[in-house]
Image (cartoon, grey):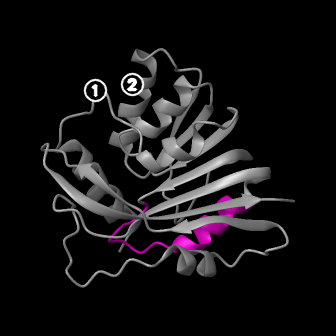
Amino acid sequence: MSTTDAVAFWDDVYATRPAATDPQPNDRLTETVTDLPPGRVLDLGCGDGGDALWLARRGWHVTAVDISVVAVERLADLARSGGVPDRVVAERHDLRTSFPRGQFDLICAHYLHTSFDLDRATVLRTAAHALRSGGLLLVVDHGSTAPWSWDQDPNVRYPTPHEVAAGIDLDPAIWQVERADAPRRIATGPGGQTAEVTDHVLLIRRTA
């Protein structure tokens, strides 16, 4: 499918629901990052912006990207109204064709799933190469389908964290897998409903 189709789809996803006024960070981000010293972070697929804003409020300098113009503009507005416009740069990128410039201490990719063609392994490999020495790549994927998910394909199969790591195919002399597991949690959907979901968590450190 074309880039235009993907942009239109994701713009529609965000435009047809109310703008988040206080988006919350992802649980796997907060448990991973809380004790880290702030630095430069790249948020791939920033969505409503909960992760980007949480990081900025803790002193991180955030580059947050999304394919949706609606999502990017809403995040920029929230950063201004929340008093952290100097710590959040919101950029529109279709990761199939462009990737943010710079080097980062942390790169996050939370639920970077799409029904459109996307070579995720290449995107995540590019992200790993954008890490500074000692930097972390945090990849959190769905391991199950929540009842409120936009994608209810009963035949979907979510790769395990080890399979994702194998697909990225990084040199173990330079990048080290620090975490690869499938924890469960109780999640809350946009309508307030709750359900147990599984996350696939992969954490990779650049050691050289």
Is residue 71 among what the camera can see? yes
**Residue 100 at x, y = what percent?**
63, 49
**Residue 160 at x, y = what percent?**
47, 77
Asked whether the beta carbons under mark 2 and mark 1 sit within 8 Å of each other, the answer is: yes
The span picked out in magenta is 112-129
Q: Upstream in the sequence, badge 2 or badge 1? A: 1
The image quadrant where one finds the N terminus is bottom left
> Is 87 placed above or below 190 here?
above
Q: Residue at x 44, y 68 (%)?
A: 182
**Residue 200 at x, y = what percent?**
45, 67
Q: Residue at x 85, y 72 (%)?
A: 173
Is residue 114 a member of the stretch shown in magenta? yes
117 sits left or right of 122 in the view: left
The image quadrant where one finds the C terminus is bottom right
Q: Residues within 10 Å of mark 1 (few under 14, many from 20)?
A: some
For label 2, the residue is 78
**Residue 81 at x, y = what percent?**
39, 16
Q: Could you tell me which secondary element the residue under label 2 belongs to?
A: helix
86 sits left or right of 112 in the view: right
Q: Residue at x 29, y 62 (%)?
A: 197
For label 1, the residue is 21
The answer to which of 3 and 106 lies nearer the viewer is 106
**Identity of the amino acid at label 1?**
Thr
**Identity of the amino acid at label 2?**
Leu
199 sits left or right of 86 in the view: left
Query: In whole angstroms, how far apart are the C-alphas of marks 2 and 1?
Result: 7 Å
Is residue 109 a member of the stretch shown in magenta? no
